[in-house]
Image (cartoon, coloured by chain):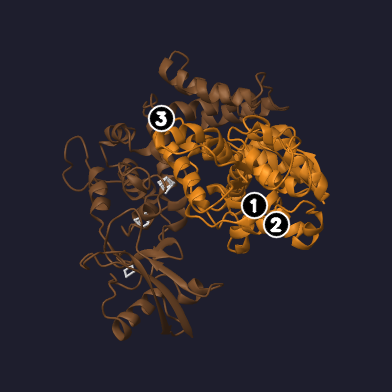
Chain colours: A orange, B brown
Amino acid sequence: MKYAFFPGCVSRGGCSELYPSAVAVAEKLGIELDELTSASCTGAGVLQEKDQRLGDTLNARTFAMAEQKGLPIMTICSTCQGVMSQANHRLTHDPSYLAEVNQELKPEGLEYRGTVTIKHLLWILMEEIGADNLRPLITRPLTGMRVAPFYGCYILRPSWALGLEEAPERETSLERVIELVGAEPVDFPGKSLCCGFPILTINEKNSLAMVARHTGDARERGADAMVTPCPLCHLNLDGYQPKAASTHGSKPDMPILHLPQLLGLAMGLSPRVLGLQRHIVSASRLLDKVKVRA
Amino acid sequence: MQAHLRVRRFDPEEPAPQPRYQDYTVEAEDYFTVLDALIKIREEEDGTLAVRCSCRSSVCGSCAMRINGHATLACKTKLTDASKGRDVVLVEPMGNMPVVKDLVTDLQSFWDKVWAVEPFLQPQGPVPEQEYLASNESMVHLTGVMNCIMCGACVSDCTVLAVDPNFLAPAALAKAYRFVADPRDGASKERLRALSQYGGIWDCTRCLECVQVCPKDVAPMDRIMTLRDKAMQAGYTSTYGARHTIAFSELLKESGRLDELRLPVMTFGIFNLPRMLSLVPVGLRALVRGKMPPIFHRAIPGVEHIRRSFRSAEAKR
Ligand code: SF4
Ligand code: SF4
Ligand code: FES
């Protein structure tokens, strides 16, 4: 199984623990990664505020590179996944638009033919690898751990761009991964809502209110940790949890795991390789609970 | 077919009003919508159930409610679709607004916000002898947003409104777009100035809920994004929101990828001491944990092509 790997900016920046943990987990899963080193940022929905067509052009460039390799794309970020899926949806549903965008790619000798599939690691796990092949790899089941799933907006909406109509099980894929690693999924209202990261610099008060609400709701329902396939959600839920807690009178004690960290733990990888020591909210009590030494 | 519905009930006139859930089983025809089932319950089983509806054909906008957790029109949702893969269809009133009774909500704040964006044309200049003329091309793109039936579904599920009642919210902002983008309107610039204030276009968190739930494909968030672009083009670039978008784009143009260290500095401005200082504790915590973006930011290979695309996009605008 081979993928053109699109790691995104944040997995090597603000969440630098994500990239190595994803690579380590991919190796265990037998996924061969061919990294798209010349690919640009997706625009993250921010560039698209100013110029959607320009955003689509940058993403078409990345798609063309994957097409040249003859590989599907693997993402490890809900936001990258969503922005790329939306761009691909527009490009593949309007041939004249695709032709116009391709004009922009010509000077670089690239052309996007509209054939690329883009899949988050979360979907690859459930759809390509499958529960039956995954189960034997779980050598350290996280029995007794209660985990609240937190998807991130962009991997859920809009459903038509993300193929959720054809594959509705994607909407509950995190819960199934949590079960597969031997932990117990905690249902809570925030799981499909916004983490608040996009407005962090614009309206910090509202952004922190979202962090406080989601971490609080998860705690109230007995979660030991939350898991997210989105590093931007991680930046806010983990990085800003202390500030959110101090403004809302709660305790910053809800560890936030990246999806590959949860998997990696259950596959016997060391917390250090997974970068668990790099979180702002310490994961040490969580590790004690499943008797893993940091 | 038999369908099972779990309906959230609430009656403010009870002695100690408390929301509760009540289960109903209905004998339904294949063609039934969720609204048909609710009406059947009300008519045949429980006359106390409050439901609001009128047209029954997704035109009037009065039957919006949450079905299986998401706001939608009950008359547009087929019961068979809503029951797919579940034992019971969950029916609740819309969120982000007070409940009058059961599934009927009070839309007063919704209307207040629509009114606040001055949803009427404000032409300027001398009044023409006959009507105001506008070309077909300049109007046809507005038909999408004019499809809004004021049902409130987008507002019900807006994630910012859930934490901040001051937010103008998607329906009113989409309505504002409808007038800003109307070639006959003379107040667009003033509208954009007002919309750039706290509670306006920059407070949207881009969660896409409104795009997902709108039964009329109005795509309110996309309208908000266009308003942001129009506001920046009109020169309203001093808000943190505008500064963030401009800085993000410039950094992307420079290196092809995000420079997380420079983005907040450029957004807030290096001399903006209170905001820069507010970053210190967060930055220190990250530093202690070794969770910092690299200080030396490298451009991607082929960045000159990214820059060229930026220049060509700028020339086109
Ligand atoms: S995208 Fe913006 S306006 Fe729409 S629901 Fe989300 S926060 Fe509200
Ligand atoms: S934008 Fe859509 S969801 Fe919102 S009020 Fe109008 S029709 Fe209803
Ligand atoms: S009853 Fe009119 S929109 Fe549903």
Which chain does the numbered disc 2 sit on? A
Which of discs 1 and 3 lies nearer the camera? The answer is 1
Q: Secondary structure at mark 3?
A: helix
Disc 3 residue type (three-letter): Met
Q: Which class describes the residues within 10 Å of circle 2: few (<14), some (14-19), or many (20+)?
A: some
Q: Position of residue A108 (x, y in %)?
A: 72, 32
> Where A186 sits versus B116, above or below?
below
Badge 2 is on which residue? A182
Q: For the residues marked 2 and 1, what is the alpha-carbon distance in whole angstroms?
A: 8 Å
Q: Which residue is at 41% across, 57% downward?
A: B214
Disc 1 residue type (three-letter): Met
- The disc label shown at residue A145, or none: 1
Q: For the residues marked 1 and 3, what is the alpha-carbon distance in whole angstroms?
A: 48 Å
Q: Which residue is at 57% across, 26% downward?
A: B311
Badge 3 is on which residue? B232
Q: For the residues marked 3 and 2, what is the alpha-carbon distance in whole angstroms?
A: 50 Å
Disc 2 residue type (three-letter): Gly
Mark before the other along the chain sequence, 2 or 1: 1
Is residue A29 or residue B11 the one in the foreground? B11
Is residue A120 at all visible to an observer of this figure? no
Which of discs 3 and 2 lies nearer the camera? The answer is 2
Q: Which residue is at 30% across, 68% downward?
A: B102
Which chain does the numbered disc 1 sit on? A
A182 left or right, relative to A190:
right
- The reply to whether the C-beta atoms of the residues labelled 3 and 2 are less than 8 Å apart is no
Q: Which class describes the residues within 10 Å of circle 1: few (<14), some (14-19), or many (20+)?
A: many
- The reply to whether the C-beta atoms of the residues labelled 2 and 1 are less than 8 Å apart is yes
Disc 2 residue lies near ligand 1 with CB under 8 A: no
- The disc label shown at residue A30, or none: none
Q: Secondary structure at mark 2?
A: loop
Q: Secondary structure at mark 1?
A: loop
> Where B290 sits versus A267, above or below?
above
